[in-house]
Image (cartoon, coloured by chain):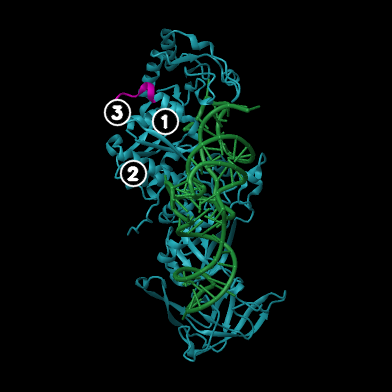
Chain colours: A cyan, B green
Amino acid sequence: MEKEERTSRSNFIKDIIDEDIKNNKNEGRVVTRFPPEPNGYLHIGHAKSICINFGLAKQYAGRCHLRMDDTNPEKEEMEYIESIINDVRWLGFDWGENLYYASDYFEQLYQWGLLLIRKGLAYVCDMTPEEVSATRGTPSVPGTESPGRTRSVEENLDLFERMRAGEFPDGSRTLRARINMASPNMNLRDPVLYRIKRAEHQRTGNDWCIYPMYDFAHGQSDYIEGITHSICTLEFEAHRPLYDWFLDHLAEQGRVRPRQIEFARLSMTYTVMSKRKLLELVASKFVDGWDDPRMPTISGLRRRGYTPESIRDFAERIGVAKADNIVDVALLEHCLREDLNKRAPRFMAVLDPLKVVIENYPEGKTEELEAVNNPEDEGMGSRTMPFSRVIYIERDDFREEAPPKFFRLAPGKEVRLKFAYYVKCTAVEKDATGEIAEIRCAYDPATRGGWSEDGRKVKGTIHWVSAEHSIGVTARLYDYLFTDPDPEDAAGEGDFTRFLNKDSLMILDECRAEPSLAGVRPGDRFQLERIGYFCVDPDSQEGKPVLNRTVTLKDTKGKN
RNA sequence: UGAGGUGUGGCCAAGUGGUACGGCAACGGGUUUUGGUCCCGUGAUCCCAGGUUCGAAUCCUGGCACCUCAGCCA
């Protein structure tokens, strides 16, 4: 059941669309698109863009296309295309029939290349990449014109056709727009439209040995698809004049003409967000793959246990603006906790077991005690938990010498075992090394269920599992991938990987969980009482679940 | 020293001339069989300096800071 999405607030893009609708531009239609390049996995920054584009289409009763921007076969792979499709769908969005590929438009783009040549607006340049770079000038110094710039239309047509036919080696020539080598906007200094590159394309195979550049493909793809609002990130702002220049010369009267609008990309604390850096983490094995639960990728977040709802909520809450930003990862965590608090069933498990013998509890006796599945939702019912003479509690929930504000178990102190009984610590037993081996307690039979009629106050409530009935589980505890809130900024010219958190993953193999947990399946999410939210990892074996800690519970220990 | 952007509390972010929404974080307090949840409370005069105006975060002028652009990447 879909929850009510948070009422969306205004932003500058909606203002623009509202204005367009008021003026009946495009007959009031809104068509957006999410155009990833399949050269890596999608991350939370892409999720922001996805939510903006699909969200706008939904709000304005339009549509949003999913388009692979696959114009560079050297970097793109089928695996990435599949992951993108999977991730966008998982996030909860539907593009219907509108799945496209820029490569579908290669022939049309080529024809437009010819058209620009005929109009005298494009030419074949014979310079090497180095020469092109050397003649581009600098932001404050104009570039110099290519010798090819003065070629005749006929010669350009001939050369461009032969480029396509494969007569020239890779990198030997390009098709360039004839704009202005002295433009203060570097993007307008005769940008390259086509390069020769003999690389097999995932979709077009070896049909082409020339491939269009982003600038020549993107806007025209938008135009072909009837996109009304082409929303991208800020770094493309300087490309907008070029985007418009192509449309000025290629678009027909009366057809929808897309408008490019730029917003600030998402940055988040304690992580990195560029595909290049994420690829580096994967390639150099700092993480276990694109879907490592520590990665800010959609697949990583999914494996970590994040819900699509929480990610959409996050995207809504961070807003859309043009100012550079770095959002506190705590907000993402908050969105997840808020979602899971209401939906996740509770279980008990002890991560670091400490044996407790309840001396006055009969040997061999077992009771089934009722435990509430979710105090936030009565409808989720209850289950029973076996209780017996020997139980495990969290080692951290016992202190031999308790500080003043320590509410849990200590010698002579009484705590409530949640849903079970009040117990009081009577003795501590240590092993040869001085380590606490087990503790002894006495329970109060009159407190069954964890409540006393005599009004006795027990400040602490701890979780537990029956030793005999518990099952073994593995817990993978994750922490931030980086030790610095802004690793890219902190690294400066240096290597951001030096801020990698060596303790971002801790594996606990000796955890004990209540028997109900034996029934969980990969992907299941739940809360382990007092510890955090977890989900079941695909690595789980039958009877031995592997639990990923998605996020801890908020912890105010010592603050109150 | 070129061009294009952006500057509102620790982090996001509304506000479009009428006297600073909201969320996160933090910090107090209450409730609580999760030190969870929930509830209540606490913070800015809006990059700086001038100007226009009865009145400006919002308009004008001049500064300052930060981001982006010199791939045959997207």
x then y, percent, for residue A130: 59, 20
Dot placed on the residue nearer the N-terminal end, 3 or 1: 1
Label 1 resides on the chain identified as A
Please tell me which residue is depicted at 31% across the width and 40% down the height of the picture. A21
Does residue A543 sit above or below A483 in this rendering?
Answer: below
Does residue A119 sit above or below A379 in this rendering?
Answer: above
In the image, taking residue A338 as reference, residue A268 lies left or right, namely: right
x then y, percent, for residue A209: 45, 21
Q: Nearer the viewer, residue A123 or A527?
A: A123
Dot placed on the residue nearer the N-terminal end, 2 or 3: 2
Q: CA distance from mark 1 to mark 2?
A: 19 Å
Q: Is residue A7 visible?
A: yes
Q: CA distance from mark 2 to mark 3?
A: 20 Å
Q: Are marks 2 and 3 on the same chain?
A: yes
Q: CA distance from mark 3 to mark 1?
A: 17 Å
Q: Quadrant of residue A372?
A: bottom left
Query: Which amino acid type is marked by label 1?
Result: His
Label 2 resides on the chain identified as A
Query: Which amino acid type is marked by label 3?
Result: Arg
Query: Which amino acid type is marked by label 2?
Result: Ala
Residue A57 disc label: 2
Mark 3 lies on residue: A255
